Image: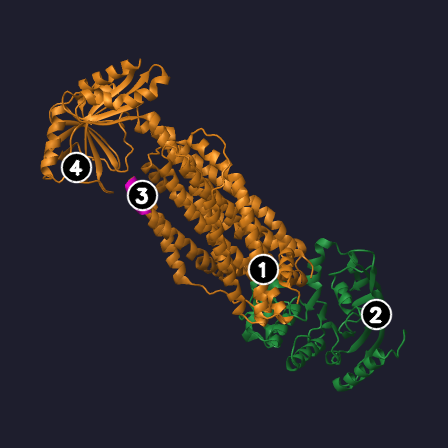
Amino acid sequence: MSLLQVRNLKKIYTTRFGGNQVQALCDVNFTVERGEYVAIMGESGSGKTTLLNILAALDKPTSGEVLLDGKSTAQIPDSQMSTYRRNNLGFVFQDFNLLDTFSLKDNILLPLVLSNKRYEDMIKLLVPIAERLHIAELLEKYPYEVSGGQKQRAAVARALITNPKLVLADEPTGALDSKATDSLLHVFESINREGQTILMVTHSTRAASHAGRVLFIRDGIVIHQLYKGTLSNEEMYQRISDTLTVLSTGGISRE
Amino acid sequence: MNRFFYSRLAVTNIKKNKSLYLPYLLAGTLIISLFYILSSVSIMVGESKMEGGSTMGALLVMSTGICGFFSLIILFYINSFIIKSRKKEFGLYSILGMEKRHISIVMFWEVLITGAVCILLGIVGGAVFSQLLFLLLLKIIGVPAALTFQIPLSSVLTTLILYGAGFAVVLVFDVIGVARTNPIDLLHSSKKGEREPKSHWLLTLFGALALGGGYVLSWTVQAPSQALVVFLPAVLLVIIGTYCLFTAGSIVFLKLLRKNRSYYYQPRNFISVSGMIYRMKQNAAGLASICILATSVLVTLSSTVSLYIGEEDILHSQYPRQVQVTCVADEQSSSVVQSAVADHAKEYGFTVENALGYTNLYFPATKDGDKFNAVQSYDADTYNINFVPLQDYNRNTGSNYTLKDGEALLYMEAEPIQSASFTLLNRHYQIKDRIPVPEFMDTNYSTSYVLIVLPEYSDLASVCDDYNKYLGGKAERTLWYSYSYDLAGDKAQLQEYYGTLRDSLNKTVPRLAQTENIDNARKDFYRMYGTFLFVGIFFVTLFLIATVLIIYYKQITEGYDDHDRFQIMQKVGMSDKEVRGTIQKQVLMVFFLPLGMAVIHIAVAFKVLCKLLLAFQLTNTMLFLVCTIGAVLLFAILYFVVYQLTARTYYRIVQAKN
């Protein structure tokens, strides 16, 4: 069974005054297998963020359903929602979303503390992840004291420390310079190689070229997908940008 | 560009920021009308030519000045809040191409409009209510008066000038503030990552010492005269201590909590403690100010109210009877005075009742073991030594002690002599008995009271001689005869009786000192303590306005800060309820910390305040306790209501979606 199944997802926003309706997602269907690294690409307004919010259970779809490990997120009661999110999902955001009142260490430990873990157990989990992400020396620093790339690595550590089934990344490279971007993408690749499932929303071709599969979304529909297979990152980059060119000139119609 | 552009923009700005400006305008108006009312009432009192009006007027004028000073500080404080929260807006103007000069013009219009509205409404409101409050003052001091409407021009002018200048200074500060920052800073000023505050151990220690010192000072006070000396330094120490502990102590404490891993890494404490560290950094000074203001409100309210309510007690301790006559005593005094008083009373159809008469000698002395050392003048360490002959004591208290030569009865406050005898001016006295508080005498002095009852009138005379010789002419004391009595008869005659008493007694009583009566004294008392109460009400109102405003603006700024944090925590996996719970806990802690501290301050200061009130002759500790508790409860309720109202605004800001 697939880890994540998205079926006939539809989302319609109604503006607050008057009945103006905006259809953000029309009919989205896709699945993500265990251990996959999937990128979702699309331009601004294509519905990527709405999709991610629904996957993260931060927003509810108008119709359709999302199954994680065979379980529909719609069936989880509100009271358990945050626990569910904490235990099953890891988040990486464009603007890091680190709390500046916490040191990096405390930021990373936050989900564990919320789950009432013992301090000794938390440290056991923290040390190897911090080593892997090369932030072991920075743990006592505060977010305002470190660079953007370091902040994002801390955010990744926070997403990974609960050992989630799925890591959701929303434009993770959006606020990083090219060096930090490369370094972060390598981190993603390496954790994916170790079996971590990652779903990343991006409009950076470079970021997407590291993924195993790229879904293209436009006007609320998944209109195309590319498998990386045995292609190198550079070749994949070329394929993606070709696809984007065709897409933006309107070449490919709905499948 | 349209010449109304700037003024229109200013109006729009004020409207758009109405959550910031509405309380500002309201408070400004209130503060200015308070000032205007005080100022005009003091002029009305001066012009009314009422008895004792000049002293009241002087007290009111002084209070007006203090009120004006505080009100300006409050205005500056609020304004700095508003400008801080609007920096981003000014930054945006710069980006959109407005020069600082243009921003200054907009600011000029904003200050002009807000200032004009506040001053105008303040004066109008003040004029409407000043007459009412003047009547209230007259009611408090017990003088009947008719309603006349009056707007003293000088009050209007003073108000205009004071606050006109005040707002001008506000504008200058605002303009300088904007001129000194560049647009990018203005745009990002609220977003800057805040540094974690450092632990200042030294400052914490200093604060603890200052607060402790202040507490110890006020706790160790014995005599009221000491209280007067000690009070101001103690208050200063407590203020310094409060500020230091709020700013440095709180952070040291929270960081210690954070070091304790088993406490800190709990979901409940994890976010609160780290959040509080930053919250205290930003709010410590404001919270300390709230604490000090709250304490002042409580002290002012409880002491003025209990002085006013306790007036009758005070009067009765000073005037055990309706009329009191004092003269320099000789052996015939009692019979001369008594017959003169009886004769004069008869003229007006009164009979003398409940008479108390006694010969009395008093002087200051210090205590050294079981020895008194007579000194020239009273100070904090001296005892007020009083002598009364046995006959007078027995008659006035209905007791029948007997004393042999060299024996004495003793009543003593503070630290009484423990041994069975004492020495005074080279004479040795056996203490035959310890007597209770002599009710017929006024023992409420600011120095500790001692009463020594000696066998005969002649014993008092020789002690007096000894004292005068001992001091070698530096002080000359005499024996006094004091006679107090009530009058029974037609009350309508009283004023006339009081009016002629002195002249009538002077005919027969040699060396008459004082003729006083409780009815005229009561009027003086009401005038004085009534004015205290009146002024007290004003200051309480003023301090309350300041407290409410600080709470309100703190909630708003906190809200904007917490908004982002709230969003992140939800994304990272905290439920809405958990987030709200932790935020509420923090906010409650932040806002009830100053109240709690203020209550502690009051509790510790209670003793010294009692002593201070004793200097005003108020001995009714129970009354003061009730007033204090009442004031604390009232204030706590008000504080809670304000907190609830402002918390709503706070949650609205925090939960607003992006």
Distance in Å between CA atoms under marks 3 and 1: 51 Å
**To which chain does the residue with label 4 belong?**
B
Residue nearer the viewer, B256 or A97: A97
Residue B73 pos. (x, y %): 47, 54
Distance in Å between CA atoms under marks 4 and 1: 76 Å
Q: Earlier in the sequence, mark 4 or mark 3?
A: 3
Amino acid type, label 4: Asp
Amino acid type, label 1: Trp
**Residues tagged 4 and 1 counted as in contact (Cβ below 8 A):** no
Instruction: State which mark lies toward you, 2 or 3.
Output: 3
Is B22 rendered above or below residue B613? Answer: below
Residue B296 pos. (x, y %): 43, 46
Mark number for residue B109?
1
Residue A222 pos. (x, y %): 84, 71
Q: Quadrant of residue A114?
A: bottom right
Q: Quadrant of the C terminus of chain B?
A: bottom right
Q: Quadrant of the N terminus of chain B?
A: bottom right
| Left or right side of B642 for A218 | right
Q: Name the residue carrying label 4.
A: B370
What segment is highlighted magenta in the picture?
A: B224-230
Instruction: State which mark lies toward you, 2 or 1.
Output: 1
Distance in Å between CA atoms under marks 2 and 4: 102 Å
Residue B582 seen in this snapshot: no
Is B203 rendered above or below residue B414? Answer: below
Q: Quadrant of residue A219?
A: bottom right
Same chain under badges 2 and 4? The reply is no
